[in-house]
Image (cartoon, coloured by chain):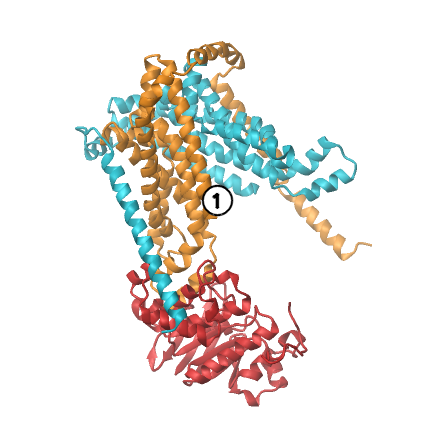
Amino acid sequence: MLTVTSRSTLAEMKAQQNKGLLARHPWHFALLVFALVYGWSFMRLGVDPIMFLKGFPQMGGLLRRMWPPDWAYIPAMIGPLAETAQMALLGTTFGGILAVPTVLMAARNVNSNRGIYLAARTVMNFIRTIPDILLAALFVPVLGVGPLAGAAALTLFSFGIICKLSSESIEAIDPGPLEAMDAVGSGKLSQIAFAVVPQILPQFTAHVLYVLEINVRVAGILGMVGAGGIGMWLNTSMAIFQYRKAAAIILMFFVSVMLIDYASRKLRERLI
Amino acid sequence: MIRLENVTKNFPGGVQALKDVTIEIEDGDFVVIVGMSGAGKSTMLRCINRLVEPTSGLIYIDGADITKVKGNDLRKVRAKIGMIFQTFNLVKRSSVLKNVLSGRLGRTPTWRALLGLFPESDIELAIQCLDKVEIRDKALVRADQLSGGQQQRVSIARALCQEPDIILADEPVASLDPPTSHVVMRDLKRINRELGITTLVNLHFIDLATEYADRIIGLREGELVFDGPASEVDEKTFAEIYGRPIREDDLRGGVVEDSSTDELAGSGAYSD
Amino acid sequence: MSDLQAQIIGKLRGGIYKRGFLLALIVVFYVLLITDLEYVPTRLSAMSIIKSAFPPDWSYAGSVFKGMMESINMAVVGTVMAAVLAIPFGFLAAFTVTGKKGSQLTKTLLNADRSFPELLLAIIFVRAVGLGPFAGVLALGLHSIGTLGKLYSEVVEAIDPNPVEGVRATGANSVATTWFAVLPQVLPEFVSYALYRFEINVRAATVLGFVGAGGIGKPLILNISYRNWDKVAMIMVVIIVAVTLIDTISGWLRSKLV
């Protein structure tokens, strides 16, 4: 005799069977799609593992020509290295400053005005689609060759990332204090200052430091399109086949990246 | 004086939270509003400071209709109404003092608020409010380091700091244990007596209601079903308000914490 | 005014002066930084560029699509390669698997790999395997192993040990335990991170062409150098549309996973 529970389970199972083929095996379908996309890409590229094997000796040759790095070149690199750091610092700072009002405007729980919300969201999403080096390549004709273009490009780039990360933090805050500030009769800005900011400040700072780490790496490369920093020197030395100088530059770059990573990690630990 | 005239609130989705409610509350009254969950108590309270917009009807405070005011005028109205929430709604990362000072935000110019430059008189007032709830020694402690009862007292201090004419308390003790519940209710009653502030409290514990209220208002499914002095109320009246017999969990239990003895004699439901 | 009041007011006020001073220092520092930036003024103004960029050269759209497709293909193959190769690294870098020392070692390795900007890798690979998308695929793939490896390791460290214990208790060996208890927990997150990486790699793939590694990058940089702003605008339109589409699809997929 069927009991109540087994009857409802049967009903569920029947309903399950009546769903389409797709709904019943979502994983299998996804795998199929994925295999198709991958196979298609692979075909179109004409990529070939054999080529890779042939390429190894060539790569080896390149690496051999880069060793040992030209140590004497290093002092000359300090200036450009500082310039790279300068670009990264400025870009991160101003990107963060621009991000603050934008991300507040793009948060549904803070901003009740639909028009401003949509505008802020659009700007955010638009800027995020443009890769960093492309931004730099576009700024160079306008602002001239040099670190100003790089700093400007990094500002927009940082702005995009900080906005994305922080908007997720803001939407996750406790709405209670905000309601309380509303009940007290506080103006919108004060509400934000007292109820929103204290809740997201630690996360926002962590995001900014994370972006700083990214920017230092990116800044090293922007020079390749003329936007300042050691990238420009790297380009030149590779172009005139001075591989050992290039190796020295790459080495210096790594050292500075690791230094800044270390400093940033220490800073983050002290904040949390 | 607070006066609600034919106030109705419909929520999207067809829920009618308040149906044609008319109530008059005199200055200095200590009123407890009872009813089951969903009876409309919270909605009614929030209509008074317009955190919820009534669908129709009028609300007068001291003779002025506040249903249509906007912007700065609405803020001025809210500045004179203090609200206490079930979830305390303090800013967890900020100090007790900063939380209490935020009660002044309805009257503080934005620039002062953003810089944290509250006038000395405000700071003195905040400290006095902390005295009133006997929590001055925790002034510089972070709000999330306090117990539930202490946090609620801080939020009472915040309300007091607004120098309000009215205090609205929405289920102020639902998150607290029985002895602390009595302490908080006692504080609210004392403030009402000493400072003459009109106080409206939502409760679903009927023993607390009969013990502390001067006047009791009963809501059932959005309608006003009882309005009279607390002395006229007995278990039968409550059963009528609730529309069902009274249960164990409608009672808070516990006794008022006597400072001269640590013993807690009590019956009833201890929820933790 | 009582002692406590004086103390509190003193603390509040003092804090403001200290913070104000610090802020002033920082502002001075930044002003110096900015004025130190050198730049070579160009004869082009932003306005003239924007004016010649509109309307975009629609006739160019056909070849742009091909180039964009190539970039996307590069990103697909590169990300898949990295997603698979990073799995063992992910486990090796988790301190729950290899202990503190082993995981630290692996993590440092992965960090070093992450620090290699894709463009740099692309340059090296172009020298090694020649111009074209293959270099790009390798660059993207190799770089992504670093980031994905680190993200995977965090997932592995965070798995719930209870199902693992449960399966082991039935007498299953390591392989079966991994298959039944570990993989179902980590695979959705792995795929989610891989999709996220894919979104980023599509953007990266568009610029790798700058150094000859295939995709839309080459025509893009050429047009910028020749100041064909209308063609540049067309390319950017295609890039933005494609990236937004991919982001949306990927975002939707990811929400279904976790």
Q: In this orientation, which residue lies closer to the viewer: B20 or C252?
A: C252
> In the picture, which quadrant includes the N terminus of chain A?
bottom right
Question: Measured from the top left, where is residue A261 in percent x and y?
Answer: 44, 35
Q: Residue at x 36, y 62 (%)?
A: C12
Q: Position of residue B3 (x, y in %)?
A: 40, 81
In the displayed structure, does residue B232 sit left or right of residue A59? right
Give the farthest residue toward the left: C43
Which residue type carries mark 1? Glu
Q: Residue at (37%, 79%) from the top-left corner?
A: B60
- The outermost residue toward the right is A1
Q: Which chain is orange?
A: A
Residue A212: which quarter of the image? top left
Q: Colour of chain B?
A: red
Q: Is residue A110 above or below residue C164?
A: below
- Label 1 resides on the chain identified as A
Instruction: Find chain C in the image and tell me its colour.
Output: cyan
Corner quadrant of residue A143: top left
Q: Nearer the viewer, residue C12 or A125?
A: C12
Res. A126 in view? no
Q: Position of residue A253 (x, y in %)?
A: 39, 26
The secondary structure type at the circle numbered 1 is helix
Label 1 sits on residue: A269
Q: Relative to residue A223, is residue B248 drawn left or right?
A: right
A145 relative position to A167: left or right: left
At 60% from the left and 82% from the top, the residue drawn is B238
Residue B44, compared with residue A162, is above or below; it is below
In the image, B120 versus A174, the foreground residue is B120
